[in-house]
Image (tube, helix red, strand yellow):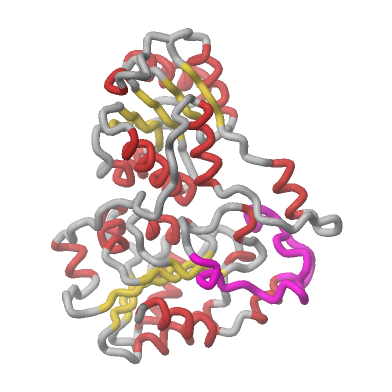
Amino acid sequence: MNTSFNNYTNVHLVLIRLSAMGDVAMSVHVILAFREKYPKAKITVVTKKLFQPIFEQISNTCIIVWDTKIKHKGFLGILKIYQEIKKIKPTHFADLHQVLRSKTLTLLLSLNKTILCKSIDKGRKEKKALTHWERKTFKPLKTSHQRYLEVLIDLGFTNIQLKAKNILTPLCLSLNSKKCINYNSSKTYIGIAPFAQHESKVYPIEQLKKVIIELNKNDNYQILLFGGGSYEKQQLDTICKTLKNTHNLVGKLNFREELEVISQLKLMISMDSGNGHLATMYGVPVISIWGLTHPYAGFAPYMQISENNILPDLEKFPKIPTSVYGNKYPKGYLEAFNTINYKDIIKRSLEVINE
């Protein structure tokens, strides 16, 4: 290779992660750990246009947008993105995604002898054992952050370590963001993201509403509700109607503005979903409410203590986690949510806010 490891100004690391939002957000901590050790190295992130704002704060970092719908659709699209990456002359390529698109791209790039390519080990066998309903191997697996880090270590960057300080600086609020959250510097802002992709990861809204109502009673708190789409907006509008300190942000902010607001939170309460990972990018404490997935699969928010994971009763529901993503579960297992007392969520929330 042409790269001299005695002069990291020659290093150009390209990483790819296209989705999902939480997985993309988790890569930030690893990139920051790399940047800490190699401040002069160049980084390029290949991702979707939506996620560009996630990486804009990382110094000496460029973004290549992979438009999988139009410009880079299909195999010809992969060839186009390959040519774009080849032009910027990377020395190292890290596939943090490991799907057909990224595998094909990695193969093409590996044909260039000047580019060292490595891919993530997703641990599919261990995850299958963890989520087996009858013959379960119940033990904590590597986190996604650790798996991302291992790719960089395999590329030769062996002295990188993940630390609590590998977070982004809070963003300044735009005028629109301030208006939408009724900004007051003396208030404590608490984010709540009640939804997730699958029903098995969503705490019943009527129970979560009790948490919101209790926190709303404190006039020093401003409760900010996150979500997306017309159904979620309608649900959250109904909750906000009679609560003066609670604001529904659905449809009011663009993605960058959402990041601005999230970065200013004192606490984020989320399901096993992307909003929790967005919050930890900025060092915001996250309380995660888990349903039929489990932190052992490796998707818990970055460096959060176990007390911040609110779990159902695993003795009554021993098949949890029933799947990695929450898309499969036995009959009757949605009842597991009934073993999570909303008062426990309130109690832990107040503990975190007052720490």
* Extreme residue in the right direction: 134
327 drawn magenta: yes
Residue positioned most to the bottom? 217
* 211 w.r.t. 253: above or below: below
Q: Give the image location of residue 15, x and y in percent.
A: 42, 31
Which residue is drawn at the image coordinates 38% and 14% (left, top)? 86
Instruction: Judge by depth and name the residue closer to the eye, 232 or 273.
Output: 273
Q: Is residue 2 above or below residue 120?
A: above
Q: Position of residue 152 (x, y in %)?
A: 47, 31
Quarter where residue 176 is shown: bottom left
Identify which residue is drawn at 42% across, 64% down: 227
Would you say the magenta stretch is mainly helix, strand or loop? loop
Query: Height in image: 234 above or below 153?
Result: below
Q: Quadrant of residue 257?
A: bottom left
Give the residue drawn at x 33%, y 57%. 282
Q: Quadrant of the C terminus?
A: bottom left
Residue 64 position, x and y percent, is 34, 29
